[in-house]
Image (spheres, helix red, strand yellow):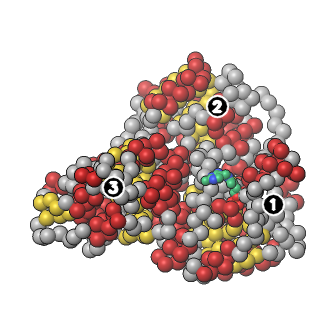
Amino acid sequence: MASRSSPETLRGADILARTLDRAGLRTVFTLSGNHVMPVFDAAIGTGLDLIHVRHEAAAVFMADAYGRLTRRPGIALVTGGPGHTNAVSALYTALAAESPLILLSGHVARDEIGRGAFQELPQADFAAPVTKASWTAQSAAGLGHDLAKAARIAASGRPGPVHVSLPFDLLEEEVEGSAALWPDDAAFAPVATPLSDVAADATHAALAAARRPVILVGPTLCDAPGKALLQKLSAATHVPVVGMENPRGLNDATNGAFAEMLPRADLIVLLGRPHDFAIRFGKPPFVAAAARFVVIDPDVALIGRAIREQGPRVVLTAVADAVSAAQTLTERAPASPSRSSEWCAEVAAAVTYQLSAWKETSSPAAGPLHPLDLSRAVAPIIDGDPDAILICEGGEIGQWPQALIRPRRRVVNGAAGPIGGAIPFALAARVVEKSAPIVVMMGDGAFGFHMSEFETAARCGLPFVVVLGNDAGWNAEHQIQIREYGKDRALGCELSPARYDQVVQALGGHGEFVTRPEELRPALERALASGKPACVNVMIQRVAAPSIRRQVGTA
Ligand SMILES: Cc1ncc(C[n+]2csc(CCOP(=O)(O)OP(=O)(O)O)c2C)c(N)n1
C-alpha cells in the first residue's frame, strides 16, 4: 500500500474519490477494512465526508435513507468478504423501497482470484439478486466511469441499489492523469423513460370511461416531491391517487380504511406500483373480479407479471418511469375533470379515517403508556415544521404513527418489511436535513439491531430523537402467536425491559426514561433541546397495531 509515486499520476483510489467529489456525492457511509484503505487515503484533501459507522448494514441503510430523501444515490463503502456480506443484507430493503444507492465494496486483487485469497468471494454474484446491476470494476482508469454508470442506473427507471466491487490492485494502480478519466456531469444523470402522449391520452380516456377509477403508486412517488406532484394529478383529474410503500399492503395504517374502497374500483391504474402481495395479488374480495387494469411501469418484466396475473383485464400498458408518467399525465389531463369530485372525496375520507375508539383511548395514570399517546406527543413536533422528518420502524409500534401522523417527509421501513434500519435512517436524515426535527418511532426489539450507531451519531454530531416504545418483547410476532396459536402458546418473543436510554447515554447521547404519561412530553422536549442523538425510552402496553375497519356501503 502506498501513496502516489509522482504528482502526474493517480491511483485508482484517487480517481474514485475525486470522481465522487466532482459529482457532488460527497457523503460516504463507510466502515474500514483492508481492501478499501486506499480509498480512505485518497479521500484526504478531497471534499469527501467519510461517516464511518459500526456495521456495514447500517452504512447501506444510511445510503438508502439518503437516496430516498434526496433522489440522489447514497454512497456506501465497505470492505470485501464479510464486510460485503454484511452490507448486502440491507440492499434488499433499498431494492423494495426503490431507493437509489451505490454500494462500493473492496475486493481481492484480480491476480488472487481463485487462489484462496483472504476474504475472497464472488461478490458481484452475491449482490446481484438484490441490486439493479452488480459488477466488478475492470480497469483503474475506468473507475470514474464505473461510478457514473452506477449512479445513472441507480436513479433511472425504477430507482434502486447498484453494486460495484473494487479489486484492490485497481485501487493501487497508478495511471497518468488525463481528461478521459473524468466522466462529464451528464453521465451521472438519470435517464427518464417518458410516457408517450399517446399512452397518456389513452390512460385519460380509460379513466374518463370508468366510474370509480383509482391510481395506485409505489414508493418512488411517496416522497415529498412525489406527493406534491400526485396532489396536482388528482386535482386535475378528480381521480384518487393512493401511495403504497408499507409492507402491510392494504392494511397499511397510513391509508386508513382504503382497503374497503379498493373492491369498489372498476379501473385500477398501477402507476409504477408493482402487481404483488400488497394488493393481495389483485384478487377478490380485495379487488373486484370485474376491475380493469392500466399498467404503467419502467420494468417490462413487471408489466408482464401484471398481464400474467390479470389476463385480459389489463386493458392498457405503457413503459415509463413513475415520475415522468405522473408528470405527463398531469400535463395532459383534460382542461376540466370529466367527473365530479365525489368519488375522490369518498376515497380521501377512507384514507384519513381514524377509529373513534382512539379518541377514548389513553394511558392509565400510573402507566405503562398506550402506544397512541406516543404518537400524540410526537405529532405536534412533526406537524410544526414542514421540513421535519418522521421515521417509522416496522413492528406494531411503528403502525401507530403511520395511522396518526401525516408528515410531508417520512422514511418507513418499506415494502421489504425489515426491522432494524430506523436508527441508521435517522442518522442519514440528519446529514440531509440540518435543522428541522427528526423523530424516530420504533420498538425495543428493532432498537437492538443498530443501537451502536448512537455512538456514530454522537461522534459525528448528528442529533435526532428516538421515541422507543418498550414493551419488553417482539410484539408483532407475539400478536401473531396469540391470534394464530392461542395465548398459552406464546414462545420466544419475550425481551427484558432494558434501559436503552442508559445505553444511549453511555454512547454519548441523551437518554430519558418514561414510565408515566405526564413524564412523556417534558422528556421529549428535553431530548429535542439536548442537541444530541437521544432516546426517550417509554414503557408501553403490549397492544396490537391499529386495525382500521369501518362499515361502508358497497356500490
Ligand atoms: C430483519 C427482520 N427480522 C425479523 C422480522 C420479523 N419481525 C417483524 S416485526 C417484529 C417485532 C418487532 O419488535 P419491536 O421492534 O419491539 O416492535 P413491536 O412489534 O414490539 O412494537 C419482528 C421480529 C422482520 N420483519 N425483519
SS at mark 3 in the image: loop
Direction from residue 13 to residue 264 in the image, left or right: right
Q: Give residue 298's quadrant in the image.
A: top left
The N terminus - image quarter: bottom left
Instruction: Answer left or right for 464 relative to 155.
Output: right
Report the number of discs: 3
- Whether disc 1's CB lies below 8 Å from ligand 1 is answered yes
Q: Residue at x 59, y 24 (%)?
A: 309
Kind of residue at disc 2 = Phe
Pointer 2 residue: 281
Distance Cα–Cα, label 3 vs label 2: 46 Å
* Residue 363 horizontal/vertical position (percent): 85, 67
Report the amino acid beneath label 3.
Ala
Which residue is label 1 attached to?
A: 542
Residue identifier under label 3 = 117
Q: Amino acid at mark 1?
A: Arg
User: In front of the other: label 3 or label 2?
Assistant: 3
Q: Earlier in the sequence, mark 3 or mark 2?
A: 3
Label 2 CB less than 8 angstroms from ligand 1:
no
Say which of 492 and 310 sits in front. Answer: 492
As drawn, is 520 to the left or to the right of 244?
right
On the image, which quarter does residue 342 sit in? Answer: top right
Is the C terminus in the top left, top right, bottom left or bottom right quadrant? top right
